[in-house]
Amino acid sequence: MKQFIIFIIFLSFYSNSSAQFYKKHENDKLKFYGTLDIRNSIVFEESLGFYGVKLGVGNKRVRFGIGYHELSKSVFRFFLEEDPFSPLKFDEKFFTYRHISAFVDPILYQTPRWELLLPIHVGIGPIKAYVYDTTGIERQVISKDFVPSFTVSIKANYRVFKWIGVTAGFGDNLVFLDNSQFGKEFNTLFYSFGIKLFFDEFGKFSKDKEYRKKYLFKFDFIDD
């Protein structure tokens, strides 16, 4: 049911914003594209970050390429007994999730300041999770090397200057693992927000002194 609701939301965004994606632009030449991709989600009731990088090519309609993302977390929990003289008990959950993905980012809407994307990732990679208790005995473990995943999201970018701005978005990460607790935990909604660097501008700044002097800290660059 959750996946169906998410799909309807994304379909609504796409239906209302896809005109620009299909529109022919004057310059559709593919150029290098690279960006950091940081997501935040809840796994095993813990808030954590999912860090990644995306490299590829793109134009004003679409971007595509290869991405790498990694989640690694160790969680300690302590248990207090009613008897104050009882030894302290704890358990530790340690899990990692790394995957390589092919991505496509249709650009649904774009102006000199705003950009609305529909990032889609299809990936595969290892998931490993271990749980230890006070005795040091491993109570649960999962270790799979080739776990497929599918990720879809909506992301908006806003340029403050030509080379830096802010970004925010949300999405759903579907991991095709199993119906165990581990499988359910990694199938999770995520959100993202933070600073956005537009790496395509750095090349222009490094090559053209006049361009750098004119636009490095010019807020009203869209008036040119």
Image (cartoon, rainbow, N blue to C red):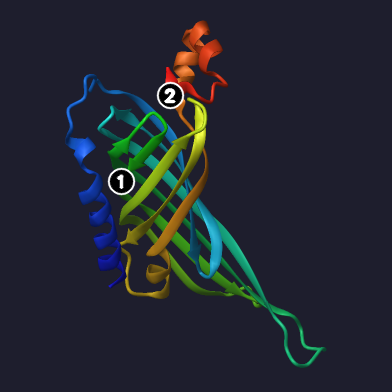
Q: Position of residue 187 (x, y in %)?
A: 37, 64
Residue type for callout 1 = Leu
Looking at the image, which residue is at 51% across and 17% down? 215
Closer-to-camera residue (151/98): 151
Pointer 2: what residue? 222
Q: Position of residue 118 (x, y in %)?
A: 30, 46
What residue occupies the far right of the structure in this picture? 85
Lower sequence index among marks 1 and 2? 1
Name which residue lies at 52% across and 7% down. 209
Of residue 184 and residue 205, the one placed in the foreground of this image is 205
Q: Residues within 10 Å of mark 1 (few under 14, many from 20)?
A: many
Instruction: Provide the secondary structure element on which disc 1 rests.
Output: loop
- Vertically, is 215 above or below 160? above
Pick the quarter of the image with the C terminus.
top left
Residue under the point 39% across and 28% down:
112
- Please provide percent x and percent y for residue 92: 60, 69
Task: Specify whether 202 is left or right of 7.
Answer: right
Nearest the viewer among 131 and 44 is 44
